[in-house]
Amino acid sequence: MGYQLKIRVATPRIGTYCRVTRDPACFLDEALNHEAARTPNILVVDDDLDIQASLRDLLQDAGYQVICKSNGAEAAAYLRDNPAPACIVFDLWMPVMDGWQFFDKLRGGAGSDIPAVVVTAAESHWGYPIPPKQVLRKPINPNRLLALVASLKTSGPVSAPAPVSAARPK
């Protein structure tokens, strides 16, 4: 794959020859695939499509590949079937599977070593599933998010804080 066979017939004095060359489009595909393999993936999980698009654009402009999912169930399915991202940015208030349930599932499974950032409008009295320094309240400061993602993707797993006695939404 990626090679193209070209047979050229020249004048009788030169003869016939066969030349195997690379299709130029293959160089581009290889370069893009190689670059994609080096670019960290960030999983964004938010049910608000405008916020999802804003986060995607911000992170892509910063050089990340971004995968977007609309709730914790979609994100959990993605994580089950794909390589782990460098970091997960997720909301807490989502339908189907909220951020608290998603993080509980993440912490109990193979994704427990993936760094995470919560981007939410939820007040702290609801109890955050990760350390407060990794929680950004909406509306977010884009520079702070980029700095936090950059620091987390290189620092490794995030441990959950001690359980909070505050009631979570049902």
Image (cartoon, grey):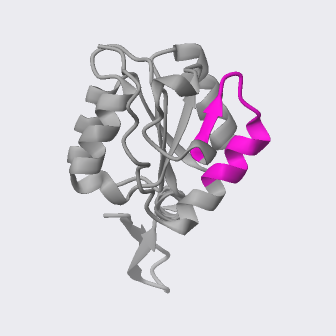
Q: Between residue 170 and residue 75, name the one nearer to us.
A: 170
Can the viewer see residue 77 in this picture? yes
Can the viewer see residue 83 in this picture? no
Image point (50%, 57%), residue name: 36
Question: Is-magenta flag for residue 104?
Answer: no
Q: Extreme front residue here?
A: 165
Where is 81 relative to 127, above or below? below
Quarter holding the C terminus is: top left
Where residue 74 appears, as percent x and y from the top left, is 29, 28
Where residue 9 appears, as percent x and y from the top left, is 42, 71
Where residue 59 appears, as percent x and y from the top left, is 64, 41
Q: How many marks?
A: 0
Image point (59%, 33%), residue name: 56
Magenta span covers which residues? 134-149
Q: Between residue 100 and residue 61, name the one nearer to us.
A: 100
Question: Is-magenta flag for residue 144?
Answer: yes
Image point (43%, 61%), residue name: 157
Q: Between residue 115 and residue 42, name the one nearer to us.
A: 115
